[in-house]
Image (cartoon, rainbow, N blue to C red):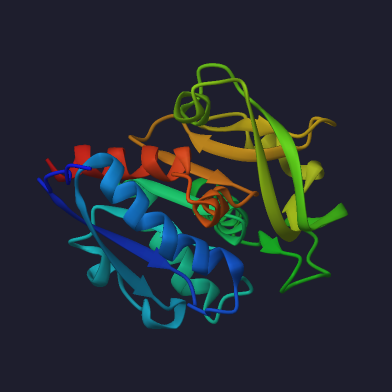
Amino acid sequence: MIPIAVTTQLTLALVGDRDERITAHRAIAATLPLVARSLGVAIAPLWLSTDSITSTAVLKHVHGVWCVPGSPYKSMGGALMAIWHARTHGVPFLGTCGGFQHAVLEYARHGLGWIDAEHAETAPDAPRAVISLLQCALVEASETVRLQPGSRIAQAYAGSQAHEGYHCRYGLNPAFQAALLKGPLMASAFDAAGEVRAIEHTNHPFFVATLFQPERAALRDQVPPLAAAFARAALAAAR
């Protein structure tokens, strides 16, 4: 096999509290070399523990931000600061599992001005818990999701559906769904019952978050399509 020439180096911030016991973290470590080879780029991962993010200065020179699974994070504030920076500065963003949950929370607080928005995992009695317990926990479960036609996620998968794995107990609270997703944040993937499984921001170069963990494909030595799409967006931003 002829090696692919490396033409560009991408620095991708991986926001989360790294723990090799977490399957998704091992999967992300396997994902990045696969994506780098498929795109002919070098990827430099910058793992940032959430409690180390006290200002956006650490994100100044990154080409993309991936908010990874593993919540509750050591610092919710650090995670939200990184997501806010990516959303408001046009930095390509991918959120998976806990990253999805906190992308919703960040948008609720700072995009809609709901300063009392909370996550039920850390504030179970909050009246405006935009992230709440799922009716059926998705712990080491998998399901087929329907992708919204024309969405960035559908473009990434080049199809109308995907079969993905999960490790989560919390998702978008249906009580606040309509207000949260009336634009520019939109739902872009759904389960068989119509529950939201992915969101994206329509006024952004690439801002996609999934409740499922697409990175798990790398554990089967497959390039995760959404991670590749994220890296392509970061590459476009780098150039």
Q: Residue at x 50, y 47 (%)?
A: 111
134 or 32, which is in the foreground?
A: 32
Q: Position of residue 149 (x, y in %)?
A: 57, 17
**From the image, which quarter does the N terminus lie in?**
top left
Q: Position of residue 70 (x, y in %)?
A: 59, 70
116 or 83, which is in the foreground?
A: 83
84 or 9, which is in the foreground?
A: 9
Q: Taking 187 as reference, is 30 above or below it?
A: below
* Residue 90 can be seen in this image: no
Task: Single out the residue that lies furthest toward the right.
Answer: 135
Q: Taking 86 as reference, is 29 above or below it?
A: below
Task: Single out the residue that lies furthest toward the top.
Answer: 149
Q: Residue at x 17, y 61 (%)?
A: 61
Q: Position of residue 74 (x, y in %)?
A: 54, 82
Side of 171 relative to 200 (left or right): right
How many numbered discs?
Answer: 0
Q: Quadrant of residue 69?
A: bottom right
Q: Residue at x 48, y 64 (%)?
A: 80
Q: Taking 213 as reference, is 124 above or below it?
A: below
**From the image, which quarter does the C terminus lie in?**
top left
Q: Residue at x 42, y 67 (%)?
A: 15
5 or 231, which is in the foreground?
A: 5
Q: Position of residue 21 (x, y in %)?
A: 59, 79
Q: Quadrant of residue 50?
A: bottom left
* Residue 187 can be seen in this image: yes
